[in-house]
C-alpha cells in the first residue's frame, strides 16, 4: 500500500483509460452519484449466464472516482456477477494499492457501489 | 492601534506550531491565544453555573456571561444585550428565526430569499413554507455573483412576509447591499432575517442601522470557540414571541398550573448555556476590537487583491464571484481537474482549502458546476501563504492535466 493517492501509477491509469466508453450491447446499466461532491459513474455491462462478458463506464468527477471505475471494470471482466456482489471494498483498495484518507474513501467506493447495484438487480 | 500583521499571526498558536498554510477561514477561523486562555481560565478558576448560585463564584460567572452579552450587543450595535440570544451556531439561529416566525405566516404568504444562500438559510424556509403552505421566491445571482436587485424588488409583493438573505456569500464572497435590501424589505412590511456568519468579525456590522429583525452568526468564524452562535432579535419581537425551548432559566415563576417567562434574553435560553463559550467569545470580541474592524476589513481586502491578481495570471483557473464588493473568499475551478483532487493534492503541501459544494448546492449548480475549490483568507494569512498556494496549484495542473 502507498500513502500517496496520486502516485504515478494512478496518474498513468487516469491518463490512459481503457474502459471509459459506452458498449453497445449492454444488458445492464446503472448510474451512481455522490451527491455531496457531484461525482458520477455510469457502468455498462454485458452479462451472459451470470458472467460479465464486457464492461465499461462513463463518468465525471475526481481522479480517484474515475480511476476506481476504470480499475474495477478491468477487474470485473470475465468474473461471475455473484463474485462482484460479494466483493469487498478492501479488495478494491488492494487493486488500487493506495490508502485513501477517510473523506476520499467515498470517491473510490462510488464505482463499487454502482457495480454492486447492477449485480444485485 | 499599530500592531504589524506578522505579530498578529503570532497570536494564533496553531499557525506557529505547525507548517499549515491555513486557507479555510470561511469554514472556521483559527483562535488567538487570548481566546484559548479565556476558556482555560474559566474552567480552571471561574467555573460555576450561572444565575442561580447564591455564592460568589456563581455570581462572578454570571457577571462574566452577562458582560459577554453586553460586548456582543455593542459589537454589532444592538441597543441592548436583551436582544442577544446565544445559540449553538448560526444555523441554529436561522432555524429559530424560522420557528419564531411560523405564527406570523398564513397560507399563501410568500418568503423571498436568494439562490446564493447556504443550506442553513434555505432549508429552514423550505420546511416552513411546506408547513404553512407558503411560496418561496429565489432571487437569482448575476454573472459577477451579485444579487439581481431589480429582480429582488420585483419579487416583493403584498404577500411577502419574510425576506431572508446572507450578508456575505460563503461561496462567492459577495458583500450584499444590506442597507438597500433592508430598506426595500421594510418598506414592503416584511420581516428581515440575515445570515451574518461570514460577515461578523470581517466587516463592520450594525444591526441598529439595518433595522433588521433577525441577524444570526457563529462565534467560531470570528476567532471565538465552536459550539456557540448568536441570534440577534429585535427586542419588541422578543417580548411578543413565545420561546421555542422550555425548562430551567427561561422562567421566573413556576407553579403546577402556571409559569411566567423570565426577562429577556433569558426567556430564550432554556437550560445551562455554553458559559465558557460566551466568555471566550467576549475575549474574541476584545481581540477584534483591539485590532479594529476597519483595519481587519482593509487587511483582508489587500490579501484578496493579491490572491485575485495572482490567480488571474493562470489561464486554467476560473474564478467565480468577482463583485467589487467582496470579502476575502475566492472560489474557483481548474480546467480538467476536480476540486477534490485540488484539495487533496494541496493537502500534501500542508495547504488547507475547502472543496465541494460548500453547503450551497443550488448556487454551485447555478454556476454550472458540480464542485468548486475555495480559498478563504483572514488577517493572519500573508503573501507567503498565497505564494505557496500558487506554486502548488501550478504543480497540480501540470501533474494532472495530461500526464
Image (tube, coloured by chain):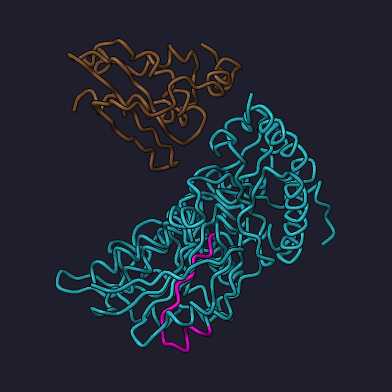
Residue B268 appears at what percent x and percent y? 37, 68
Height in image: B173 above or below A115?
A: below
- Residue range in magenta is B183-197
- Is A88 or B382 nearer to us in this picture? A88
> Residue B257 colored magenta?
no
Write down which chain is painted cyan. B
- Is B15 or A108 nearer to us in this picture? A108
Quarter of the view holding residue B395: top right
Chain A tint in image: brown
- Is A68 or B244 nearer to us in this picture? A68
Q: Which residue sits furthest left?
A: B257
Residue B321 appears at what percent x and percent y? 61, 59
Identity of the residue drawn at 41% across and 42% down: A36
Height in image: A101 above or below B229?
A: above
Height in image: B202 above or below A114?
A: below
* Number of numbered labels in the structure image: 0
Residue A108 appears at what percent x and percent y? 42, 26
Amino acid at each position: 500500500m502507498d500513502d500517496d493517492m496520486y502516485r504515478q501509477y494512478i496518474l498513468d491509469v487516469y491518463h490512459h483509460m481503457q474502459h471509459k466508453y459506452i458498449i453497445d450491447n449492454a444488458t445492464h446499466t446503472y448510474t451512481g452519484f455522490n451527491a455531496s461532491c457531484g461525482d458520477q459513474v455510469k457502468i455498462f455491462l454485458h452479462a451472459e449466464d451470470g458472467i460479465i462478458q464486457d464492461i465499461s463506464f462513463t463518468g465525471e468527477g475526481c481522479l480517484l472516482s474515475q480511476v476506481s471505475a476504470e480499475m474495477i471494470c478491468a477487474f470485473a471482466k470475465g468474473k461471475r456477477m455473484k463474485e462482484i456482489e460479494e466483493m469487498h471494498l478492501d479488495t478494491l483498495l488492494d487493486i488500487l494499492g493506495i490508502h485513501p484518507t477517510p473523506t476520499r474513501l467515498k470517491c473510490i467506493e462510488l464505482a463499487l457501489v454502482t457495480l454492486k447495484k447492477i449485480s444485485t438487480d | 492601534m499599530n500592531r504589524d500583521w506578522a505579530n498578529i499571526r503570532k497570536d494564533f498558536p496553531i499557525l506557529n506550531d505547525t507548517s499549515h498554510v491555513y486557507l479555510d477561514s470561511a469554514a472556521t477561523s483559527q483562535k488567538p491565544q487570548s481566546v484559548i486562555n479565556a476558556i482555560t481560565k474559566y474552567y480552571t478558576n471561574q467555573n460555576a453555573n450561572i444565575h442561580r448560585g447564591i455564592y460568589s463564584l456563581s455570581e462572578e460567572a454570571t457577571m462574566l456571561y452577562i458582560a459577554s452579552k453586553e460586548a456582543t450587543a455593542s459589537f454589532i450595535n444592538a441597543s441592548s444585550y436583551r436582544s442577544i440570544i446565544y445559540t449553538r451556531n448560526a444555523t441554529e439561529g436561522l432555524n429559530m428565526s424560522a420557528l419564531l416566525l411560523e405564527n406570523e405566516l398564513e397560507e399563501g404568504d410568500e418568503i423571498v430569499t436568494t439562490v446564493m444562500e447556504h443550506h442553513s438559510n434555505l432549508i429552514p424556509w423550505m420546511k416552513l413554507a411546506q408547513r404553512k403552505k407558503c411560496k418561496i421566491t429565489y432571487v437569482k445571482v448575476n454573472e459577477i455573483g451579485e444579487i439581481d436587485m431589480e429582480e429582488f424588488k420585483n419579487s416583493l409583493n403584498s404577500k411577502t412576509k419574510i425576506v431572508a438573505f446572507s450578508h456575505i456569500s460563503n461561496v462567492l464572497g459577495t458583500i450584499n447591499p444590506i442597507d438597500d435590501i433592508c430598506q426595500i424589505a421594510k418598506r414592503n412590511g416584511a420581516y428581515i432575517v440575515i445570515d451574518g456568519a461570514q460577515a461578523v468579525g470581517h466587516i463592520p456590522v450594525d444591526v441598529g442601522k439595518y433595522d433588521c429583525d433577525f441577524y444570526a452568526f457563529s462565534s467560531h468564524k470570528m476567532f471565538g470557540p465552536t459550539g456557540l452562535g448568536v441570534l440577534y432579535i429585535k427586542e419588541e419581537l422578543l417580548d411578543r414571541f413565545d420561546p421555542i425551548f422550555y425548562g430551567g432559566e427561561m422562567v421566573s415563576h413556576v407553579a403546577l398550573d402556571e409559569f411566567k417567562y423570565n426577562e429577556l434574553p433569558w426567556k430564550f435560553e432554556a437550560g445551562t448555556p455554553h458559559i465558557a463559550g460566551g466568555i471566550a467569545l467576549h475575549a474574541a470580541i476584545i481581540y477584534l476590537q483591539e485590532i479594529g474592524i476597519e483595519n481587519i476589513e482593509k487587511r483582508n481586502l489587500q490579501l484578496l487583491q493579491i490572491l485575485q491578481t495572482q490567480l488571474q495570471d493562470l489561464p486554467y483557473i476560473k474564478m467565480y464571484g468577482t463583485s467589487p464588493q467582496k470579502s476575502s473568499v475566492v472560489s474557483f475551478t481548474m480546467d480538467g481537474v476536480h476540486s477534490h483532487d485540488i484539495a487533496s493534492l494541496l493537502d500534501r503541501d500542508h495547504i488547507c482549502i475547502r472543496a465541494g459544494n460548500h453547503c450551497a448546492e443550488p448556487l454551485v449548480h447555478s454556476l454550472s458546476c458540480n464542485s468548486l475549490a475555495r480559498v478563504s483568507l483572514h488577517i493572519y494569512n500573508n503573501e507567503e501563504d498565497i505564494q505557496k498556494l500558487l506554486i502548488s496549484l501550478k504543480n497540480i495542473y501540470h501533474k494532472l492535466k495530461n500526464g
